[in-house]
Amino acid sequence: MDENVENNILDTESLNTDVGQDLGDGTVDNPFKIADLETLIAIKNNLSACYCLTADIDLEGVELEPIGTSSAPFTGVFDGAGHTIRNLKMERGSTYTICNFK
């Protein structure tokens, strides 16, 4: 797995340069673009930003930790834009609060 994924780091400036596209700035008018596992995981680094899914993501074989907690909840915006996240599995331990959205 990529070191940035392991460390849950989203460096949009270098990603924008590397792929030659705008990955957004997290505002309503220009949300962060989520197209892969790396950028999906990085949501936990900014729980109040705006995000937009730009591709279907298949998480087969991947188990994620929840994004946000009861003391630090996700308060941002996540627009699925008609895309799907498939095979989502989360490690929740003894926590029973979970939110799914469409």
Image: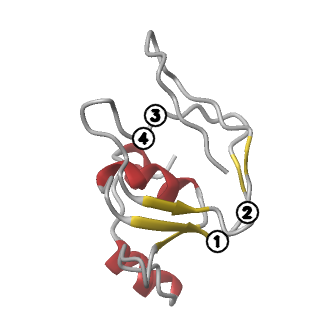
Numbered-mark total? 4
Q: Sequence order check: which comes first, mark 2 or mark 4?
A: 4
CB contact under 8 Å: marks 1 and 2: yes
Q: Could you give the CA–CA distance between mark 1 and mark 2, rounded to whole angstroms?
A: 7 Å
Q: Residues within 10 Å of mark 2 (few under 14, many from 20)?
A: some
Q: Sequence order check: which comes first, mark 4 or mark 1?
A: 1
Q: Is residue 44 found left or right of 101 in the rendered image?
A: left
Q: Nearer the viewer, residue 99 or 24?
A: 99
- The residue that disc 4 covers is 67
Measuring 48% from the left and 16% from the top, which residue is drawn there? 96
Measuring 57% from the left and 53% from the top, which residue is drawn there? 37
Q: Is residue 45 found left or right of 19 in the rendered image?
A: left
Q: Could you give the CA–CA distance between mark 1 and mark 3, rounded to whole angstroms?
A: 21 Å
Q: Secondary structure at mark 2?
A: loop
- The residue that disc 1 covers is 54
Q: Could you give the CA–CA distance between mark 2 and mark 3, rounded to whole angstroms?
A: 20 Å
Residue 19 place in picture, x, y as percent = 52, 83
- The residue that disc 3 covers is 66
Question: Mark 2 belongs to which amino acid?
Answer: His
- The residue that disc 2 covers is 83
Eyeballing the image, is 46 above or below 14?
above
Question: Mark 4 belongs to which amino acid?
Answer: Ile
Measuring 40% from the left and 54% from the top, which residue is drawn there? 42
Measuring 46% from the left and 49% from the top, which residue is drawn there? 41
Q: Could you give the CA–CA distance between mark 2 and mark 4, rounded to whole angstroms?
A: 19 Å
CB contact under 8 Å: marks 3 and 4: yes
Q: Secondary structure at mark 1?
A: loop
Q: Which mark is residue 74?
A: none
